[in-house]
Image (tube, rainbow, N blue to C red):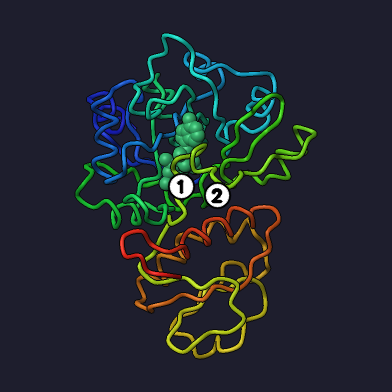
């Protein structure tokens, strides 16, 4: 804690555990510190970052809560819900954090991150602590594997509890738009808000610029909703029953034998990375239901399977 606090106060970027995934954190009011995040991640700088706070009171120093956003923060903070809110005039958040937008994405994490922000007394800008376009890390080892010597300090808090990134929503005229499915199920938000969520339209990339079609990409190709394993493929399974050809797969990891999407979310990125490291050219993925955290899991899998911009490769 002391080392992390000193490094952040000195304008350094530090990889820290949160309950969702590991974040690469820097003082959100210090432009040079935030620039170090982009440098380490090799991330396009038009992509805005989430500001992490201790609570609503800290967020109110720079963002405005409408009544519905406040209700959601009260229900889900600290936790895996990010709210996109209008910035207040005269706020101290560096424009590099928001990519010049007039809104800011804010969430209050649990655990070490929360204690660190309280100790520092400032919001922390933190994207997931992976190289841009790669799988989000759910362990300190995965951070080290992805960012290596691009960063000087990784805080090891063990495996993250939730395993997928936060859910991102934005309130527009008393309606809630889902910008990114994540660690809080859409159904849970709908229950608190008493309304159904508006889903991202085509072109939602403009709303959440980080939501590139190809994202979270392992080196291997990904083949979703597979009903059989082709020769040479590795298998990412879900539920009690394996598909045809599973016995001949190059490697098999099952996200949840019991068919539990919460358990599967917690293991998703770790298992994708492990199967990838195994060296198969393609990972077949068994069908995963779309309810609860299944929505976030299927979203991440679809991005991992999308054509890659670097190679133009299909599948
Ligand atoms: O669980 C999480 O959310 C993790 C942990 C570290 O907190 N963070 C994370 O950050 O996933 P990142 O930077 O990988 O994703 C942030 C997402 C991006 O899709 C970005 O485009 C979107 O938030 N975002 C940030 N500011 C926004 C804004 N003002 N309006 C719309 N989307 C925004
Ligand atoms: Mg990310």
What is the count of numbered marks? 2
| Sequence order check, earlier mark of 2 and 1 | 1
* Residue in front for this viewpoint, 154 or 277: 277
Q: Quadrant of residue 288?
A: bottom right
**Residue 112, position as x, y percentages in the image:** 44, 36
Q: What residue lies at 36% left-to-right and 25% top-to-bottom?
A: 28
| Relative height, residue 138 to residue 311 (above, below) | above
Image quarter hosting the N terminus:
top left
Q: What residue lies at 48% left-to-right and 58% top-to-bottom?
A: 303
Q: Is residue 287 left or right of residue 14?
A: right
* Extreme residue in the left direction: 149
Judged from the image, the secondary structure of the residue bearing numbered disc 1 is loop
Image quarter hosting the C terminus:
bottom left
Is there any visible trace of residue 122 in the rendered image? Answer: yes
Query: Does the Cβ of the disc 2 residue fall within 8 Å of ligand 1?
Result: yes
**Residue 33, position as x, y percentages in the image:** 26, 29
* Residue in front for this viewpoint, 152 or 214: 214
Q: What residue lies at 66% left-to-right and 72% top-to-bottom?
A: 239
**Residue 300, position as x, y percentages in the image:** 52, 56
Judged from the image, the secondary structure of the residue bearing numbered disc 2 is loop
- Tell me the residue that label 2 is attached to: 162
Is there any visible trace of residue 18 in the rendered image? Answer: no
Q: Is residue 187 left or right of residue 144?
A: right
Task: Compute the Cα span from label 2 to label 1.
Answer: 7 Å
Q: Which mark is residue 21?
A: 1
Crowd class of label 2 (few under 14; some 14 to 19; many from 20; radius 10 Å):
many
* Residue in front for this viewpoint, 221 or 157: 221
Q: What residue lies at 64% left-to-right and 28% top-to-bottom?
A: 171
- Contact (Cβ within 8 Å) of mark 2 with mark 1: yes
**Residue 140, position as x, y percentages in the image:** 35, 51
């Amino acid at each position: 804690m002391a080392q992390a606090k000193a490094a952040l106060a000195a304008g350094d970027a530090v990889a820290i555990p949160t309950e969702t995934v590991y974040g690469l954190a820097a003082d959100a009011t210090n432009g040079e510190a935030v620039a170090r995040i982009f440098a380490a991640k090799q991330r396009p700088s038009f992509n805005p970052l989430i500001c992490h706070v201790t609570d609503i009171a800290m967020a109110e120093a720079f963002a405005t809560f409408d009544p519905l956003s406040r209700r959601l923060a009260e229900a889900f903070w600290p936790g895996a819900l990010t709210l996109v809110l209008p910035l207040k005039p005269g706020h101290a958040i560096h424009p590099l954090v928001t990519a010049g937008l007039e809104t800011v994405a804010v969430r209050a994490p649990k655990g070490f991150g929360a204690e660190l922000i309280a100790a520092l007394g400032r919001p922390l800008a933190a994207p997931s602590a992976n190289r841009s376009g790669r799988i989000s890390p759910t362990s300190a080892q995965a951070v080290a594997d992805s960012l290596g010597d691009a960063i000087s300090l990784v805080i090891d808090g063990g495996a993250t509890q939730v395993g997928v990134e936060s859910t991102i929503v934005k309130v527009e005229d008393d309606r809630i738009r889902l910008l990114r499915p994540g660690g809080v199920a859409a159904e849970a938000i709908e229950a608190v808000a008493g309304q159904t969520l508006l889903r991202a339209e085509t072109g939602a990339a403009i709303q959440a610029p980080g939501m590139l079609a190809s994202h979270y990409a392992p080196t291997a190709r990904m083949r979703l909703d597979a009903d059989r394993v082709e020769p040479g493929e590795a298998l990412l399974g879900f539920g009690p029953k394996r598909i045809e050809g599973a016995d001949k797969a190059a490697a098999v990891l099952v996200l949840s034998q019991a068919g539990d999407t919460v358990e599967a979310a917690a293991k998703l990125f770790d298992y994708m990375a492990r199967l990838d490291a195994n060296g198969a050219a393609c990972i077949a993925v068994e069908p995963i239901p779309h309810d609860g955290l299944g929505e976030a899991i299927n979203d991440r899998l679809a991005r991992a399977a999308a054509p890659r911009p670097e190679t133009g490769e299909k599948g």
